[in-house]
Image (cartoon, rainbow, N blue to C red):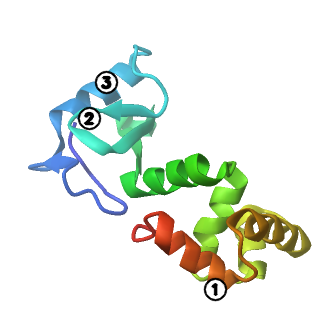
Amino acid sequence: MAVLAEHGDAQGLTEGGRLVPELEAAARARLAGGACAAHSRLASLPEHRLLEVDRAPGGRVLVWLRHYAPSRALFSRRLRERYGFKLRSQQLLALVAQGLKNREIAEQLGLREATVKTYLHEVYETLGVKSRTQAIAELRRTVPLEAL
């Protein structure tokens, strides 16, 4: 499949203006309704997931991929294992670690600012800290923050 346009970092996804063979095969299988499951992992592209493939007018094929950062997965796993944090707390902590304010976190997660404050107090209690700065220091001590 020829690549007509790219959005974002496509390094390693194309060769000579075409999709790499494994990605092309997965896209063709998805178009044919084959065994290529949603969010498919690709052995030669471990940091990407094939999300969707569709045929556009004119016969062009649209391929959607998501870049998957392994260190984010490690961050989430460590938070879950060490502190028992569920997904929402993990998302909240990732945004706190990125330096977002409560209002910005609320917008990102589709929550009210008061709800973010409530979650933060629960997270602080679990971490054994009293402030955002202490929470980030505790996270730096126990989980990888470099990918956030």
Instruction: Give residue 98's position: percent from left, percent from top.
Output: 55, 77
Q: Quadrant of residue 113?
A: bottom right
Q: Quadrant of residue 34?
A: top left
Q: Is residue 34 visible?
A: yes
Q: Are marks 2 and 3 in contact (CB under 8 Å)?
A: no
Q: CA distance from mark 1 to mark 3?
A: 49 Å
- Residue at image position (24%, 48%) is 3
Q: Indicate the amino acid at tag 2.
A: Leu
Instruction: Give residue 117's position: percent from left, percent from top.
Output: 84, 74
Q: Secondary structure at mark 2?
A: helix
Q: Is residue 98 visible?
A: no
Q: Sequence order check: which comes first, mark 1 or mark 3?
A: 3
Q: Sequence order check: which comes first, mark 2 or mark 3?
A: 2
For residue 114, above or below residue 75: below
Instruction: Give residue 128's position: percent from left, percent from top.
Output: 71, 70
Asked whether 76 or 20 is in front, the reply is 76
Q: Which residue is mark 2?
A: 23
Are there few (<14), some (14-19), or many (20+) residues within 10 Å of tag 2? many
Name, please, the residue furthest toward the front: 128
* Residue 133: numbered disc: 1
* Residue 28: numbered disc: 3
Q: CA distance from mark 2 to mark 1?
A: 43 Å
Q: Sequence order check: which comes first, mark 2 or mark 1?
A: 2
Name, please, the residue furthest toward the right: 114
- Residue at image position (72%, 78%) is 104
Q: Secondary structure at mark 3?
A: helix
Left or right of 108 on screen, residue 39: left
